[in-house]
Image (cartoon, rainbow, N blue to C red):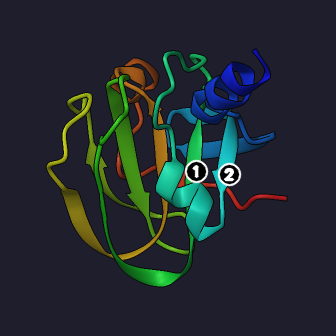
Amino acid sequence: MKRICLILGFFTPLALQATPLTLTCSHGTIFLEVEVAQTSQERDKGLMFRADLADDGGMLFLFPAAQKVGMWMKDTPLSLDMIFANSKGEILAIHENTTPFSTKTIGPVANTAQVLEIKAGTIKKLGITRDCVLSSLP
């Protein structure tokens, strides 16, 4: 029984600690609680195997330097909206309603320092556009 628990534990997605993130837009401020993927291992795992995501939740992928970044949906059962931003939080590209489990590359987008993944439909629901700016994390 112990081995089964250990094996199942390996496949259980563990959430990173949630951190407040704001998007400042011309129509107001949007508040989210996101997990932050900073290490290579955290970025590689991302939201894989997650069956649910809070309406105000998401994951912010931080890269050590601005670079050409492409994302994919491998092993991700949720459809997501993706926001690619530079180091100042300025939005470079928006991709809505990604296809779950797809290995097709989304992007790549040059000069990307961060990517925000949120539940599909959130961009439209909250009116997020390229004029919005992601805040700096504490």
**In this rendering, position of residue 30 left or right of residue 127:** right
**In this rendering, position of residue 70 left or right of residue 138:** left
* Res 60 label: 1
The residue depicted at 38 percent of the width and 30 percent of the height is 123
Q: Is residue 69 above or below residue 5?
A: below
Picture quarter containing residue 58?
top right
The residue depicted at 49 percent of the width and 17 percent of the height is 51
Picture quarter containing residue 42?
bottom right
Residue that sits furthest to the right in the current view: 138
Q: Residue 89, image x and y in percent?
A: 54, 64
Residue that sits furthest to the left in the current view: 104
Q: Residue 130, image x and y in percent?
A: 35, 51
Residue type at the position of mark 2: Val
Q: Nearer the viewer, residue 80 or 96?
A: 80
Q: Residue 94, image x and y in percent?
A: 29, 48
Q: Nearer the viewer, residue 91 or 34?
A: 34
Name the secondary structure under disc 2. Answer: strand
The residue depicted at 25 percent of the width and 32 percent of the height is 101
Q: Determine contact: label 2, label 1, CB under 8 Å.
A: yes
Name the secondary structure under disc 1. Answer: strand
Q: Nearer the viewer, residue 129 or 40?
A: 40
**In this rendering, position of residue 112 left or right of residue 50:** left
Task: Locate the N terminus by quadrant.
Answer: top right
Residue type at the position of mark 1: Leu
The residue depicted at 37 percent of the width and 44 percent of the height is 82
Q: Which residue is mark 2?
A: 36
Q: Residue 23, image x and y in percent?
A: 59, 44
Within 10 angstroms of label 1, few (less than 14), some, or many (20 or more) residues?
A: many
Q: CA distance from mark 2 to mark 1?
A: 5 Å
Task: Locate the C terminus by quadrant.
Answer: bottom right
